[in-house]
Amino acid sequence: MAKSLDDILNDDEFGLLEAEIQKTEIKTDEDRLIESFEEINDFFEKNNREPKQTSMSEYALFSRLKEFKNNEDRKAFLKSFDRHNLLGKVEVKIESLDDILNNDDLGLLNSGGDNSIFEFKHTPKSGSREKADYVAKRQALPEAEFERYDKMFKQVHRELKEGKRKFLEFKNTEDNLVEGNFYLVDGLLCYLKVSKAEKVLRENKSGDRMRLEGRTVTIFENATISNMLFRSLGKAIQKNGKIITNPEEDIENQLFENAGVAKEEDRKSGWIYILKSKSEKPEIQNLENLYKIGFSTIPVKDRIKNAKKEPTYL
């Protein structure tokens, strides 16, 4: 006799159909901050010392701890988790009556009576400080979406320990902030997934020039994503970060594939100009065959419109 669905479910002798539903916990920014600091605690407990700047495998933890020490807000938040006094002394800012009451370590203000007079019901609370561009625009990535990036970050950590990748000083944003590359900023690895930066003509006192500006899509190893500005990301890396080189075998493959190949977008174009000085100074007029030869990516008329103010044009 054929069994009904209820009969099959009720006759599960070995409990094969008893499956617990896995709940996915959504981590807050505070959870991620604590986890990142706990990694430093674990390192100290294992090695009985702080991470070193000179060690390639420890540099990320060193940079992260340095950022925590220099950020009073984060230091105050993490102090209760600082089992080894890695953060040092935390300065308590007294800005309101609540700060005084909350900082009563000796309980001098704990009367045990009615404290209702200290409750402000009709006055607005002060707003939080405005965060930096690259922090304020970070959003948490769903666990399933972050999974493939997590594997990439773990691989980068392995390759750093194996010496296949290295940390280098980050200098020129326009040349070194490249889509698809990895960077270290404030102790966290980040991946520049998309760069929407485009060349924009900017007017300056010394002459107009082209510069890259726009938004990015940047993934951080603490499962957050940001649409921070291209130049803001560059400044953040320059201030407290490094560029991470690509694996040596990848570089060799790229050199082999691209040897002698120049794409259309790689070809630099512009104007070559030859100028003769109009100066009335005798020391300039007496110089024969004095010319200035140069190259400009913008029209020559625009390039030399401020020539009178620039000594290079005599």
Image (cartoon, grey):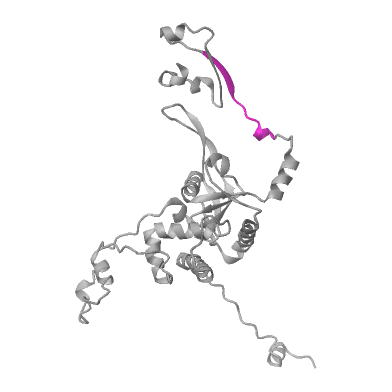
Residue drawn at (34%, 59%), measured in percent from left and top?
Answer: 128
Above or below, 179 relative to 46: above
- 116 or 312, which lies in front? 312
Decide if residue 305 is in sight here: no
Position of the C terminus, as image quadrant, is top left
Decide if residue 277 is in sight here: yes
Residue drawn at (53%, 62%), measured in percent from left and top?
Answer: 222
272 inside magenta stretch: yes
**How many callouts does the rendering have?**
0
**Which stretch is magenta?**
263-275
Residue 278 location, x and y as percent? Answer: 45, 10
Above or below, 72 relative to 263: below
- 157 or 85, which lies in front? 85
Looking at the image, residue 127 sits to the left or right of residue 150; the answer is: left
Above or below, 152 relative to 293: below
Tell me which corner region of the image, top left, top right, bottom left or bottom right, holds residue 131.
Answer: bottom left
Looking at the image, residue 131 sits to the left or right of residue 293; the answer is: left
Residue 74 location, x and y as percent? Answer: 40, 62
Position of the N terminus, as image quadrant, is bottom right
Above or below, 220 relative to 78: above
Residue 313 location, x and y as percent? Answer: 47, 18
Residue drawn at (20%, 81%), measured in percent from left and top?
Answer: 113
Residue drawn at (47%, 51%), measured in percent from left and top?
Answer: 240
- 157 or 202, which lies in front? 157
